[in-house]
Amino acid sequence: MNNGELSYKLKYILHELGMNRTEFLNACKMFNPSISKPTILKAVNGKNTIAPTVETLSTIIKVCQTSNNEKLKHISYDFLLNDQIQEIEAHNAQVYQEIGLSDDVIQKLKQYNHPFYYNYGNIINDYLYHLPTNYFKYLTYLKITSDIFKELSKPKPDVKKIIKYFDHDTYLDYLNRNFKNIYDGYLTMKNKKEIHNKNDTLNLLTILKNHFKYLLLEIDKKLLDTMEMTEWN
């Protein structure tokens, strides 16, 4: 088990629970009153010098499995200890551990590969093989930005929900480096728990959405140009 991978998974769990580190520690204490603050903080921050004990992992699993979050009810020792698993789906933990796709997606891919209807199996394989990983990164960022925009557009937006949408390490790092005004607005919202300059923020988010759409279209164009010039297997 890699401490960095465990830290990523625990941050994912905190994100899904909508808890900060202190709230998560208090939730753990409900099942294990003797668990210490350093034990949880070191695990979440990836600062452990040794692997967490079975008792610590068991406590974390109990917090997840008793939550109202359907995804977290499937958290297991295998999820926490297996470095290859990054996230977990709600209704198909076993399939996710193998290939990371939900039942609905798997069924659709099977349908696309049906010899009497679509028979798209080969081209789907080629497309996914040649598609750069940045595509999915920017697609994720676009989804996050769109979720924030939709919530902020409501007459009475939920500030906690917006902060939770923002809570994605690499997304925030990207904003800090490339869209500092949006990043600073997020920090103000997080610290004061209220929305300032709603219309200005919506305008900035529109620019951000268009930015990610442009990056995705550029990747698609390069991929199609490559497809024209080379023979795919």
Image: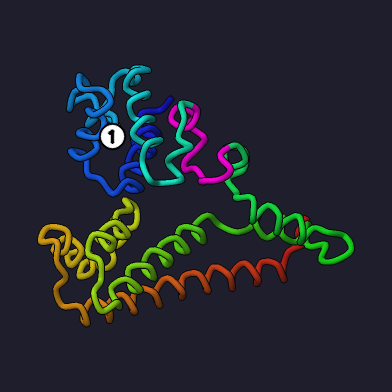
| Residue 154 or residue 49, whichever sits in front | 154
Please give the name of the residue rendered at 29% of the width and 56% of the height, measured from the top-left corner.
164
Magenta-colored stretch includes residue 91: yes
Q: What amino acid type is highlighted by mark number 1?
A: Val
Which quadrant holds the N terminus?
A: top left
Task: Please say if 95 is above or below 40.
Answer: below
User: Left or right of 145: which side holds 105?
Assistant: right
User: Left or right of 7: which side holds 231?
Assistant: right
Task: Please say if 205 is above or below 112.
Answer: below
What is the residue that sits farthest to the right in this orientation? 116
Please give the name of the residue rendered at 37% of the width and 23% of the height, measured from the top-left corner.
58
Characterize the local packing of mark 1: few (<14), some (14-19) or many (20 or more) Cα atoms within 10 angstroms.
many
| Residue 184 or residue 158, whichever sits in front | 158
Task: Please say if 198 is above or below 31.
Answer: below
Residue 35: percent from the left, percent from the top? 22, 22
| Magenta part of the chain | 78-93
| Residue that carries the numbered disc 1 in the rendered image | 44
| Residue 145 or residue 106, whichever sits in front | 106
Which quadrant holds the C terminus?
A: bottom right
User: Left or right of 78: which side holds 190?
Assistant: left
Q: Main secondary structure of the magenta part?
A: loop
Residue 40: percent from the left, percent from the top? 24, 29
